[in-house]
Amino acid sequence: MAATTTYRYAVSAFDFVGNESARSAALSVTTTTSSVSRIHYVSLSGAHIAPYTNWQTAARNIQAAIRVAAAGDTVLVTNGVYASGGAVVYGSLTNRIAIIKPIAVRSVNGPTVTVIKGQGPYGDAAVRFVVRMWEATHASSVSH
């Protein structure tokens, strides 16, 4: 991200058969002149050593990297099916990922090779995800 630049974000998701949802309304965000962002890496074969600042120490689940990311940071996720990790945002419902701060979460190679997998059944026992601010470029697919 460049300083004093306006970026527009929208979200869409893919289900397990490849159907894409409608895009969310666009959100504009302008970076400040003092913005210093970091990249936090996620790989199923990473050593899982916070703050996950390279592929060798990468987090093994996306939520761990999201947890250490600060506003303006990027979480970069490589190929794999991510079916572990999570956070509670509302009540007692677990979410595979919960993005509730202005960060970017990106797949290295796109939704056909990077999957965020929830857990059924539907209802209170299901594992979902919550997105409030998420850069949708190369958004990962989601399956239940």
Image (tube, grey):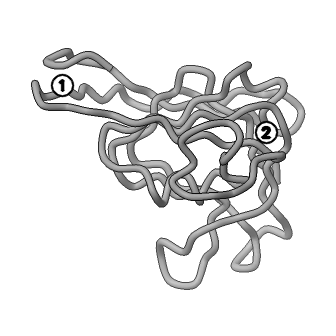
Residue 74 image point, x, y percent: 46, 35
**117 or 43: nearer the viewer:** 43
Report the residue that reaches farthest toward the left: 33
Position of 103 with respect to 53 (left or right) is: left
The single residue placed furthest to the right in the displayed view is: 17
Q: Residues under labels 1 and 2: Cα distance?
A: 29 Å
- Quarter residue 97 falls in: bottom right
Q: Is residue 29 above or below residue 67?
A: above
Residue at screen point 47% across, 52% down: 99
Placement of the C terminus among the 4 image quadrants:
bottom right
**Between residues 62 and 34, which one lies in front from this camera angle?**
34
The residue at the far front in this view is: 56
In the depicted structure, whether residue 53 falls above or below residue 26: below
Tell me the element at label 2.
strand
Q: Is 105 placed left or right of 69 in the picture?
A: right
Residue 2 pos. (x, y %): 26, 16
Label 1 or label 2, whichever comes before in sequence order: 1
Q: Which residue was labeled with disc 2? A: 115
Graded by Cα atoms within 10 Å as few (under 14), some (14 to 19) or many (20 or more), the crowding at tag 1 reads few
Q: Are marks 1 and 2 in contact (CB under 8 Å)?
A: no
> Which residue is denoted by mark 1 in the rendering?
30
Residue 39, image x and y in percent? 48, 35
Which residue corresponds to the image point at 35% horizontal and 25% vertical from the top-left?
26
Residue for point 73% across, 74% down: 123
